[in-house]
Image (cartoon, helix red, strand yellow):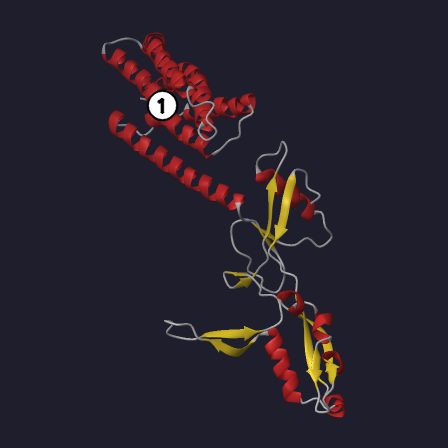
Amino acid sequence: EATADVVDIDDTRLANARHWQLTVERDRAARLGVDHALIVQTLAASLGGDDVSYLHESGAKYPVPIRLRLDEADRSNLERLLAMKIGTVHGTAVALGDVVRVEEGAIEQSQMHKDLLPMSMVTGDMAGDTDSPLYAMFAIRAALAEQDDPLPQHYISQPEDTHRASIKWDGEWQITYETFRDMGIAYAVGMLLIYLLIVAQFKSYLVPLIIMAPIPLTVIGVMPGHALLGAQFTATSMIGMIALAGIIVRNSILLVDFINQQRDEGVALRDAVVNSAAVRAQPILLTALAAMIGALFILDDPIFSGLAVALIFGILVSSILTLVVIPLLYYTFMSWREAHE
């Protein structure tokens, strides 16, 4: 509750329910002339009800029982229940409280379990300027770590020590972790497939690394772009970064392929590199501009805004840097290889 912007805090722990046990005082009941069976029967009929007669309706296959019991207000009020009169063998009536002993106790509630381990779930929501629950999680985590004997905290795996209380972060954190984990795997698989395709095209294991070098440059545009617009880095932003890898590689292939064409025509390496940037700059920038304009239409969408921000700023920065980085890297690599041949 001391964490800023955390509201609607609740937990799954249930307070023990109060209950009262009524025990018949046999000696006192015998002195007053009250039969023990009558006391039990009266309590059972008052609390649970008793069928005193049946209503026979014409055309009905079975008779309808007439059940007699106290109303809910009297059943839930111990004082009224103890004041209820019970007949004696002497023809008089005594209060139920005169022949029973009342003992108050508590009924333990059921304990929730997960993976065969007892657990209590604490939930909360966010309000104010902090819209992501992860920020509150990090704040609570830091506060718990400052305690004298902090509880162990688990983020991915389940607690293993069943003899000590511990904390397992779940909910929004688990969803975020699984989403970005799967996105990261997809990103790695995409990089591998792109590398294999470029190897098949250029028949080289080093040239694809040069062509894929501008991919990290997308981060220079994506992260500052999110900060500039005040947008959160979401799963759709990660999808945008995966898409950027293919777009940037296409630009690099255009440059390297043009350099190779120039080299096949007998143009010097230096001139071929310069010509590639000069000739391919216009189609690369026009294609980048078209993709950025297309992404503008989903920029205000609450779900796909992260995708739009990643595409716009990632394409803007990486397309410009690709025209500089690829020619320099390829010229350096080819000069080194020719010098060692």
- Across and down, in percent, residue 179 comes to 45, 41
The residue at which mark 1 appears reads as 247
- Across and down, in percent, residue 191 comes to 36, 33
Q: Nearer the viewer, residue 42 or 274?
A: 42
- Across and down, in percent, residue 10 comes to 62, 50
Pick out the residue farthest to the left: 265
Q: Residues within 10 Å of mark 1 (few under 14, many from 20)?
A: many
Q: Is residue 89 above or below residue 272?
A: below
Question: How many discs appear?
Answer: 1
Query: Position of 194 compared to 92: left or right?
Result: left
Pick out the residue farthest to the front: 58
Quadrant occupied by the N terminus: top right
The kind of residue tagged 1 is Ile
Query: Position of 71 compared to 337: left or right?
Result: right
- Circle 1 SS class: helix
- Residue 46: quarter of image: bottom right
Query: Position of 2 compared to 258: left or right?
Result: right
- Across and down, in percent, residue 259 comes to 30, 14
- Residue 211: quarter of image: top left
Quadrant occupied by the C terminus: top left
Q: Nearer the viewer, residue 205 or 121?
A: 121
Q: Is residue 18 visible?
A: no
Q: Is residue 182 visible?
A: yes
Query: Position of 321 compared to 139: left or right?
Result: left
